[in-house]
Image (cartoon, grey):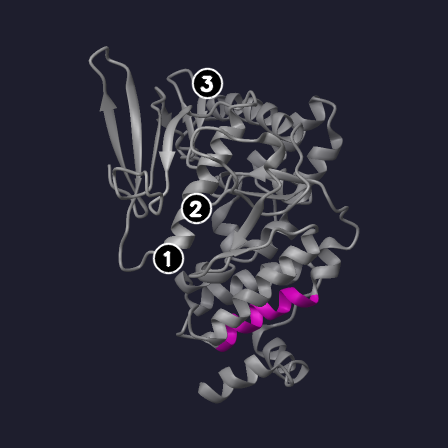
Amino acid sequence: MMGNQNCHAEITFEDSVKWLGRFRLVKTSSPPQEVRDWIVRSEATTMIHLQHTSIPTPKIFDWACESDPTNPIGVSYILMEKLNGKSLDWQEANSEQKEKVMQQLADIFLEIEKYPFEKLGSLGFAVRDTIEVQGLAHQATFQVGRGPLGPFSSSLEGSKAILNSYLTMIANGEIDARCPVDTYLVHRFRLDVLEDLWGDTPSGQFFLKHPDDKGDHILVNESFDIVGIIDWEWSQTVSKAEAFSSPCMMWPLEKFYEGSNELGTDELRLASIFRGKGREDLAKYVVDGRKVQRFFFSLGTESSFLDMETLHLLFSGLQRAFSTEEKWGLWKKQALEDWKDDKLLCALIKLE
């Protein structure tokens, strides 16, 4: 089974036991080997960590990075347990099936909460099939096309460093070379609202979050019992507000892309489930989640896949989340004046 970044092979033994081989693809568009190794190391570390919890995750039997001289295969790989389940299609599930999954997801969130981390970033400390659980503070996030960035002690520190890294890459033409000035501006706006987003957020409390929670990362059986959470590639520890906000599979996507911050029915139900478990605090993270979700949506390379109309609509949603809204043309004119001394922006304008 071939994906964009990995090749998966089912391995069946003579006693009918099945494993899954996950092999990292190497293409002309792949990041440097240092980053490829870090991605695999982070994914393996995350999954090994999860085996110390009650969160259903495939058991890892062996793994190695591409650069490991003892790796006999020559590419990065992870050998893991093959779980008997199918990927959840959230949009096709009926209300009863969704309710069953949400009840289980709420319990998984509560389990994640039991394992806070002191640093923000991706887990990346493991030695083959062993791990020092207390060593998981060895984390980082990534600079696209380069090596690790971080780890960070606060969400404010981490967000600022990541944004500055993206701004540099936009200016260098590494991100969205079609309309770099507009892309730069919507990223630059985020620097000005950092204090609003993280002003009262405590440091030293970070929680693991799945990087792509659109639904197919959840394996369910015919009864819609969750049998596994898979694909932890690019996972990170993040703020509590981000970790316990609603999964993107529950967002009303059409309205979201139009700039609306209205919560969907599934999101409101998830909040209700948390309240039923006596966790009004976690329900509040769901209800108030749009601010942090808007802040991180379509950052960096993700902006390259958006047309300008969509970029502007998403930006209007970001503005609304921070209680400010102005038509794009007027806002852009004022932003160019406000940031006229920004050297990277000036260089982009001159180039354009």
Which comes before the other along the chain, label 3 or label 2? 2
- Front-most of residues 280 and 200: 200
Residue bearing mark 3: 225
Residue position for label 2: 39
Q: Is residue 316 left or right of residue 156?
A: left
Earlier in the chain: of badge 2 and badge 1, it is 1
> Is residue 184 inside the magenta stretch?
yes
Closer to the observer: label 3 or label 1?
A: 1
Left or right, 8 with reference to 341? left
Is most of the magenta stretch helix, strand or loop?
helix
Say what secondary structure mark 2 lies in: helix
**Residue 260 seen in the figure:** no
Q: In the image, what residue occupies the spot 51% across and 57% down?
A: 258
Look at the image and tell me in which quarter the C terminus lies. bottom left
Relative to residue 263, is residue 150 depicted above or below? below
Check disc 1 and give the amino acid type.
Answer: Pro
Q: Mark 1 = which residue?
A: 31
